[in-house]
């Protein structure tokens, strides 16, 4: 399985990768992108099995990346890992085609449960 992790913070990408490993999802190919534009390009070129994206990023934010992905016909499972988890954001994410939104701070257990619900077993 190929997982694309999109976040403008290198440290946060590393935290997400560590949390994926702790949640039992570390044995997969992990690809990183620094912003929504790079994430969109990598998602279209590499066809990942899952995209985990921050919401607020320069160049292109996560919601615009998701909308562009869906407009291209991509149905890749997509989830946000972001510092904001308001009901408005959750509703907008879902209506744009996201399967979930994990709010920071998060735990490996939250990742494990959310990904199991979305994708099945690791």
Image (tube, rainbow, N blue to C red):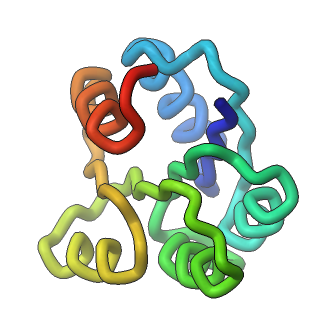
Q: Give the image location of residue 56, x and y in percent.
A: 48, 70
Decide: is 12 above or below 45.
Answer: above
Q: Is residue 15 left or right of residue 49?
A: left
**Between 56 and 75, the one nearer to me in the picture:** 75
Where the N terminus falls, by quadrant?
Answer: top right
- 43 left or right, relative to 87: right
Name the residue rendered at 16%, 70% in the picture: 86
Looking at the image, the residue that sits furthest to the right is: 45
Q: Is residue 82 above or below residue 67?
A: above
Give coordinates of residue 106: x percent, y percent. 27, 35
Kindly identify the residue that appears in the image at 58 percent across and 78 percent down.
70
Q: Report x, y in % for residue 121.
A: 39, 22
* Residue at 49 percent of width and 20 percent of height: 25
Q: Quadrant of residue 65?
A: bottom right
Image quarter (top left, top right, bottom left or bottom right) of the C terminus: top left
In the image shown, does 5 or 78 lie closer to the viewer?
Answer: 78
Residue 57 image position (x, y, % from top left)? 57, 69
Q: Residue at x 69, y 47 (%)?
A: 48
- Locate residue 117: give its quadrant: top left
Q: Nearer the viewer, residue 104 or 39?
A: 39
| Left or right: where 98 falls relative to 31 | left
């Amino acid at each position: 399985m190929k997982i694309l992790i999109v976040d403008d913070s290198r440290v946060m990408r590393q935290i997400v990768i560590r949390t994926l490993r702790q949640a039992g999802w570390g044995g997969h190919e992990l690809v990183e992108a620094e912003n929504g534009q790079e994430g969109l390009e990598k998602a279209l070129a590499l066809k990942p099995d899952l995209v985990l994206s921050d919401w607020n990023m320069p160049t292109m934010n996560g919601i615009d990346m998701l909308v562009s992905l869906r407009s291209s016909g991509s149905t890749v499972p997509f989830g946000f890992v972001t510092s904001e988890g308001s009901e408005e954001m959750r509703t907008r994410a879902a209506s744009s085609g996201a399967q979930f939104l994990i709010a920071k701070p998060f735990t490996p257990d939250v990742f494990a449960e959310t990904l199991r619900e979305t994708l099945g077993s690791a």
